[in-house]
Each structure stands twice: as C-alpha cells, then as structure tokens.
Amino acid sequence: MPASNTKPAAPHVTNFIRNIIDADLAKGAYATQTWGGRPGPAKVHAGAPPDPAKIRTRFPPEPNGYLHYGHAKSICLNFGLARDYGGVCHMRFDDTNPEKEEQEYVDSILDAVRWLGFDWNFNGADNLYYASDYFDFMYEAAEYLIGAGHVYVDRQSAEEMRANRGTLTEAGTNSPWRDRAAAESLRDFREMRDGRHADGSMVLRAKIDMASPNINLRDPAIYRIKRATHHRTGDKWCIYPMYTYAHPIEDALERVTHSICTLEFEDQRPFYDWLLERLAEGGVLARPLPQQIEFARLNLTYTLLSKRKLIELVADKYVDGWDDPRMPTLAGARRRGFTPEGLRLFADRIGVAKADSWIDMSVLEDCMREDLNGRAERRIAVLDPVRLVIDNYPDGKQEECFAPNHPQKPALGKRAMPFSNELWIEREDFMETPSTGYFRLYPGGKVRLRYGFVVECTGCEKNSQGNVTIVHCQYDPATKSGTPGADKVKVKGNIHWVSAQHAYQSEVRLYDRLFKSPHPGAAARDYRQDLNPDSRKVITAQLEPALKNARPEERFQFERHGYFVADRIASKAGAPIFNRAITLRDSWSKPG
Ligand code: ATP
Ligand code: MG
C-alpha cells in the first residue's frame, strides 16, 4: 500500500539524502529492523516480524502555528522519500512544549498535509503519533540514565549554570552536583516530578563533557520543571523533556531510519547519537538506531517563513487570519488558489542541498503558473469594465458565441457565451487618442471581439469629469468567429468582452505579494515596514455568466488576466467570489 497518493512530479534527480539511503539499503543497514506494530522501546520490537517498511521518515511539526511553504518542502521531502523507497513517513506532533500548543493547530496541520496529497497510512496502519504519548517512556528512560550514571539533577540556579557553561573559546566548569550519587539524583528527580520544587529550581542534565568544543555537549539540560497545562496531557506533568532529549527518543521509539531536519540542528547531532547509544547499550531502545540528516531550510524572498512572525501578522491584524490568501501558509495558499501539485513541483524543482540559499518567489509563482496553465479552464472576466455599445446590432437580439474551455485541450469542449448589443470591455482596451503601437479600440480602429465579431470603433461618450462612459462601435456580421470567411477581415487587436445583460457581477480580490521587499525586515528594519500596501485590491468585476456556477475552490484562467479561484470560504452557492492566485506574467522581475 502506498505511503501517499502522489506521484513524483518529475523523474527524480538524485540528491545527497537519496545517496545516503541508497548506500544504507545496499549495505542492509535495516535488514535486522523489526516492527512490533506500534512505536515503543526495545521490548516492543524484540522478536517482532521484520519491519515491512523499507525506510521510516517522519514529519514532526510542533503544533504551535500553521504550516508554511518551508514546511511544505520538508513534507514533500519526507513523504516523497518514503513513497519512493517503499517506506512510510510518520505524521508526528512534536508537542513536548506545553505552552504554545493548541488543538486548532493540530487540526490545521493535518488538513494541510492531506491537502498537499500525503497520508501516513502504511499496511493499513495509521502512523499518526504524538510525542506527548511518549512522556511516560521518556520519564522511565531518564530514571534509567540516572541509575546508569549518565545524567544527574543539577540544583544550580539558571544564572550559575549559565556562568559555568564557558564560552566558545573557554571550557565550562563542572557543576558541584555533577558527581553526586545516583540515588540522590533519583530522589530529586522524583521530587521534581511530584511537584515538590519550584519551576526552574533544578534540571536534569546529561553528564558528557564541560570542556567540549561543541557547547551542546556541555552537560545539556534534558528535563525541566514547568507548571503548564499541556493540550493533551493536561496537568499530569509538571516536568517536561527538552526538545533535544525528546526528539531522538521519539525517532527511536518509532523506528525512524532517517531523521531529516534543518541545518541548525547539525551541532545537536553528537548529542542525538550520544543519547541513543546510551539507551541502546542499556537495552532500553532497539537497534538499528535512527540517524539524523540535515538539509538546508527553504528561504524564500518577498515573504517570511517564521511561525513567530506569522503569528504576529495574524494577531496584529495585518492579514485576515492564518488562511488569508496572502499568507505564506498552506491554508493561505489553498485559499489563494495555489495547487498542491504546483507546490510539489516547486519542492522537486528546488531540490535539497546541504548549504543555505535563497529561492526567489518567482520560482514558486512560475510553478503555479505552469501547473494551473495545464489544469485551469479558461473563462472571461472584465475587471475594469466600460460599456461597449454596438450601434448596428439589433436591439433585443442575442446569439451565442463559442469559446474553447482550454486552448491545448480540445477534449474539454467549448461553452456558449451570450452576445448582445451591449457588452462590457476593459477600460484599458479603449483609447480616445491612441498611442503608437496601440492596436485595440480607438475611433476608426478595428478589433476582434474574441470568439465573436470584428467591430470598428466610432467614438465614445464621456461624463462631466471627462471619463469615458460608453464606447460606440459597428460590427461586421460576416466576421463571426468559427464561421466560414470569418477571418477575411484582418485586425491586429483582439479583446475580451462580456454581454452586459448576461454578466455575473461579483467581487474579485486581486492578491499580490505580501511584502514589497525581497528580504522583509533586512538591515534591522521592522519587517512590517516592508508590507506591500497593494497586496490586496478588492474590485467589482463583470464575469461571463458561466462563472456564476463555479464551485468553491474551482480554479480558472481569466483570459489575459491570470489564474483565479472561487474562494472556498466567502463564496455562497450561486454567488462565488474570486481570488486571484497569480497573474499570467511576472510583474515583479526587474527589467534588464
Ligand atoms: P518556524 O521556524 O517557522 O517556527 P519550525 O522549524 O519551528 O518552524 P516545526 O514545527 O518545528 O517548525 O517544523 C516541522 C518540520 O518542518 C521540521 O522538521 C523543520 O525542520 C521543518 N521546517 C520548518 N521550517 C522549514 C523551512 N523553512 N524549510 C524546510 N523545512 C522546514
Ligand atoms: Mg521548531
């Protein structure tokens, strides 16, 4: 059974992670791995059947915000590897920090991963896990480590610990509590658990090397006292494991083979290995042990990929919530009209590397254009309408013109668009005094009304402010598109239109990049100063009647304008509201 329902977007270019996995599989690194049917310590997997999954990866978000494009890279990588190697990717909530975690975030994360096209089922088993389910084991493992003399309870204050840690150039100083008897540490640790001590008054620390050049190995804290209600375990615990202690254990319990994380964890890898070795040599955790592999996180221009800052944008109402179509969240991308396929194409295209770099927003946007171009049916929308009156077209008459739903996919058929003597056209498709090279409507000029007739402009009417209110023209009945001899009259311009009496008038939101600067907040600026004031324009547009029936989340190309989606939240039945996902061409690239 597949680990997900996606196919690779393109034949895979290999990368350093695939090379590691290939080499591991070639040497049978996991040939002895068993799977006891659920995550657990050595005893759960001892004597169990061979692991049916060739590899196990995991996607381990902390449920403290909505997922963003950076997470999409990690999701596509982890779930994609599992899919390609006959393995499984576990969906795991890394919920060991009680303070900022909420059920709303859990739900939104599951939605987003599914929307991207992945699932965590393997051989009929649902691999959805919560790190908090392992709190009991983590506690037992800590007691084991105390007994084995690998960890100790330190009663130094936070300031003392900081002062004794040393610096990058100077070794740290051993804690006076470092060499106490295991029984004393055990008594203290149990008292910590039982709520007998104040928050921050003591910590459990690994006993490694206060002189290590890697500061992460200078007796890192692994458990702290924190009175906080956890979103799943409530008030059961007043001590919580540190991330650096919890994460390797979570991986090992789940028999993860390749634990892929971002580069900032590189310096933690020696501790990851140290901890798992200690627990495996004690027979607590099963071998083979997981290995941590780091890759470069996604950095994307014109946006922010930091949950903390995204939370601020929401809380301070710079956007209308986490799923505002301008947000770089997956919930925002979905409302914006971006596609999961386009995001997966993006992840494939940017690949994975071992060194940090910046990806330009246009790469993501081009992936969306590419994907939407293939899948979105064409429709006509007049976004800045002005009336066109065809003076020689009989009043009250109407007929149908036929427009292809997709120029490259004739199988998608054609639809009828009603034509009459009063149409809406784009204001910019008429100029009273044409500039050179202007081939659209101007007095005396001729254009083809796309899928309709050739018309010749005869003049215009204006209001007291001098704005054009009506453009007048005459049509040539012998030029109807699709009829014999229709192209006898040659014209250079070709404009779109909607019949005024049949049009569906609706709200359309024109979204653009949320930030106007490629590196929001660079050079010590407040990133809020870089918000793009034109990131959303709300207009009233005249749309072809077929669009009235658009279903929520149905995506279209509005010819000449871009890709649009019927908003999944704001649309009412029979009254869709449209969001612009992306324009047809990049308007941001600098000339030259
Ligand atoms: P943020 O920095 O936005 O708070 P995070 O790293 O704290 O994100 P987690 O919930 O811990 O968020 O992330 C879950 C997974 O997603 C981790 O494995 C992390 O490495 C990965 N991830 C997060 N941001 C990025 C990114 N920009 N590029 C690639 N992977 C990312
Ligand atoms: Mg994190």
Image (tube, helix red, strand yellow):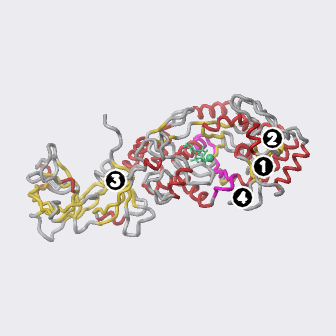
The Cα–Cα distance between marks 2 and 1, rounded to whole angstroms, is 11 Å
Looking at the rendered structure, the secondary structure element under dot 4 is loop
Q: Is 151 above or below relative to 510?
A: above
Note whether residue 467 is visible.
yes
State the mark number for residue 279.
2
Give the residue pinned by disc 3.
557
Q: Residues within 10 Å of mark 4 (few under 14, many from 20)?
A: some
Residue furthest toward the bottom? 396
Which of labels 3 and 2 is toward the front? 2
- Mark 4–mark 1 contact, CB under 8 Å? no
- Mark 4–mark 2 contact, CB under 8 Å? no
Give the residue pinned by disc 1.
138
State the mark number for residue 191.
none
The amino acid type, in three-letter code, at marker 1 is: Met
Give the residue pinned by disc 4.
228
Residue 338 image point, x, y percent: 44, 52
